[in-house]
Amino acid sequence: MYKKMKSLFFIILSLSFLTACNDQTQSNKEDPTTSIAKDIKTDNSTKKELINENGQNFTENAKVVNKELVFAVTYNDVNQLMKDSELAVEGVVLSTENYVNMDKATGIGNPLTKLSFKVNNVLKGDSSLEGKNITILEQGGYISAKQSGMKDKFPNLTKKELDETYMIIPDGHRPSVKGDQFVAFLSSESYFETGFDFYEFIAVYQSKFEYDKKSEAYERPSDDFAEMLKEADTLDEKKVIEEEIKIEKEINDHVTDLVEETVSN
C-alpha cells in the first residue's frame, strides 16, 4: 500500500506541476518575476542551499506552486503510523539542500528537500541511530522548468523560460528548514534511486509532527481550522471541521506522550 500511495502522489505532483508551470509561463510577460536560475544547475542531481536557514523568506525570488495532494491512505491514528513506519524518530534538522531527482525514462524531475537530521530519540526501529545523523528526503523544493520536462512538452520556450525556477509546496506546507525539531515516521523503501541511503516520510506531512515551543507539544501541519470555521456556512459543516480539530488534537497529544515516555525511559 505504501508503494501505491507514493506512486500516486508522485504522478499527481508531476502532472499538476506541469499544468501550473505552463500557466505561469504564459503570464511571464504580464507578471515578470526575478529568476534564481543562476543559483541552480539544471543537471540530474541539483543540490543547492536555497532554503533560508532561519526559515524566513524561504520562497524569495522563486515562483511558488502550491500542490494539492490526494492520498491513498489517511493517517488519523498514531498506532497506524507506528505500524506502517520502519523508523520513528524525534530530532532536529541540522542542514538542508535542494535535490531534484531526475527520472531517466521520462526526463521529468521530482523536487525534494534533502535534510541532514540528528536523531535525539528513537520511538521505533534501530535504537543504535540515537545521537546519529540520518538523511531524509522530503517532498517539495525548488525545480526549474527544464527539469520538470517542459523542454519536450513546449519546444518553443526560451532558455530564460526553461531556467525559470519554481518552489513546490505540497498542500501549502513548507519543506523543513535548519533548526526545525519534529517527530518523523519514516521508511527507507522508495520508488526511485539516488545513489545514497535515505529515508522518506511515509505519508508526506501526515507523518511529520513539528515541535511547538509555546505549547511544548508536537503538532502535525494542518489546515487553518480557525479560518475554516469562520467560512463554514452550515452547522453540519462546522461539526465536520470540529471533528477534524478533535482528531488532530488527539493524534498530536499521542505523539507528544510517546516522546515524553521515551525520554523518561
Image (cartoon, helix red, strand yellow):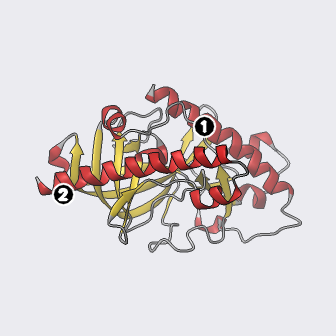
Q: Circle 1: is it few (<14), some (14-19), or many (20+) Cα within 10 Å?
A: few
Verify CB contact (< 8 Å) between mark 2 and mark 1.
Answer: no
Lateral position of residue 6 relative to residue 90, left or right: right
Q: Is residue 57 above or below residue 125?
A: below
- How far apart in space, not on screen, are marks 2 and 1 (Cα)? 35 Å
Q: Residue furthest left?
A: 265
Q: Circle 2: is it few (<14), some (14-19), or many (20+) Cα within 10 Å?
A: few
The amino acid at mark 1 is: Val
Image location of residue 212, percent across then percent down: 38, 66
Question: What residue appears at the point 57 percent right and 54 percent down from the top-left corner?
Answer: 223
The amino acid at mark 2 is: Gly
Q: Which mark is residue 221?
A: none
Residue 257 appearing in the image: yes
Sequence-wise first label, 2 or 1 = 1
Image location of residue 114, percent across then percent down: 43, 54
Question: What residue appears at the point 44 percent right and 39 percent down from the top-left corner?
Answer: 76
Question: What residue appears at the point 32 percent right and 50 percent down from the top-left corner?
Answer: 255
Question: What residue appears at the point 59 percent right and 43 percent down from the top-left corner?
Answer: 240
Which residue lies under the disc numbered 2? Answer: 131
Residue 107 appearing in the image: no
Image location of residue 236, percent across then percent down: 65, 43
Q: Which mark is residue 70?
A: 1
Q: Helix, strand or loop at disc 2?
A: loop
Q: Quadrant of the N terminus?
A: top left
